[in-house]
Image (cartoon, helix red, strand yellow):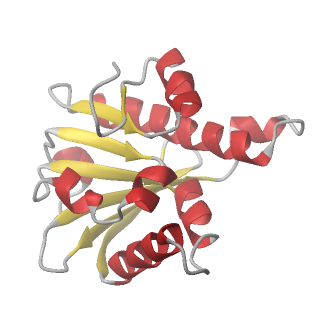
Amino acid sequence: MTNTAEKHFDKFYVIDTNIILQDAHSLITLSDDSQNLIVIPETVLDEIDSKKSGHGEINFQARVFGRLLADAEVVSMNSVSGDYKIIELKINHGFNVRVDIISKEMYKAESSRTIAANIMNDRKIIEIAKFAQDHYLKTDTESKLVFLSFDIMARTRALSLKIPTDTMRGSRE
């Protein structure tokens, strides 16, 4: 079994919730037949889970994403660097998509109780993006990590931490 740190990827995409809710199948395109690794912070899973009910397009995309995850094969589960955990998945549904879901026990943002829930979630997602940048690029220096989001505030926070961002419509590095 090959773990992510041993495999070379062209790019690492850390995905914000709004990317999946815009089009869950964009993960397939972004993966480019597993040439790129898709990184999903656990907070994104929580936000998508809260959107499954309803009849709107966002609700539909949340359910599509759920079906993609349901068809995924768990490749490995690892604890790395303190309280970070990585679940490596392979989505087999007629395509080859590699996904790492990264979780953390306690986030730095949780130490401030005055932050609104949506801002707290953005900060948790960006904290995972920063960890992913440090974790993956220390052994894969030829690759590039990009935080994908349509949220200008989240992208600005990411840029302040020197994490390249994109909207899927053009680079914002």
Residue nearest the viewer, comparing 49 with 113: 49
Please, which residue is most extreme toward the front here?
Answer: 56
Q: Residue at x 66, y 46 (%)?
A: 121
The quarter of the picture where the N terminus appears is: bottom left
> Is residue 146 left or right of 98 when viewed as pictured?
right
Q: Is residue 131 above or below residue 68?
A: above
Q: Residue at x 46, y 40 (%)?
A: 150
Camera-side residue: 155 or 129?
A: 155
Q: Is residue 135 left or right of residue 81?
A: left
Task: Judge from the rendering whether residue 118 lies leftward or rightward of residue 46; answer left or right.
Answer: right
Residue at left offset 50%, top offset 53%: 17
Where is residue 106 drawn, in percent x and y? 70, 47
Q: For the image shown, how many numbered marks are present on the structure?
A: 0
What is the x, y in percent for residue 33?
Answer: 10, 59
Q: Nearer the viewer, residue 126 or 74?
A: 126
Q: Is residue 41 above or below residue 81?
A: below
Q: Quadrant of residue 109?
A: top right
Q: What is the residue that sits farthest to the right in this orientation?
A: 114
For residue 90, above or below residue 36: below
- Image spot of residue 139 (x, y percent): 24, 32
User: To which quarter of the image does residue 98 belong?
Assistant: bottom left
The residue drawn where x is 38% and y is 83% is: 70
Q: Position of residue 16 (x, y in %)?
A: 47, 47
Indicate the quadrant containing the C terminus: top left, top right, bottom left or bottom right: top left
Above or below, 155 relative to 151 = above
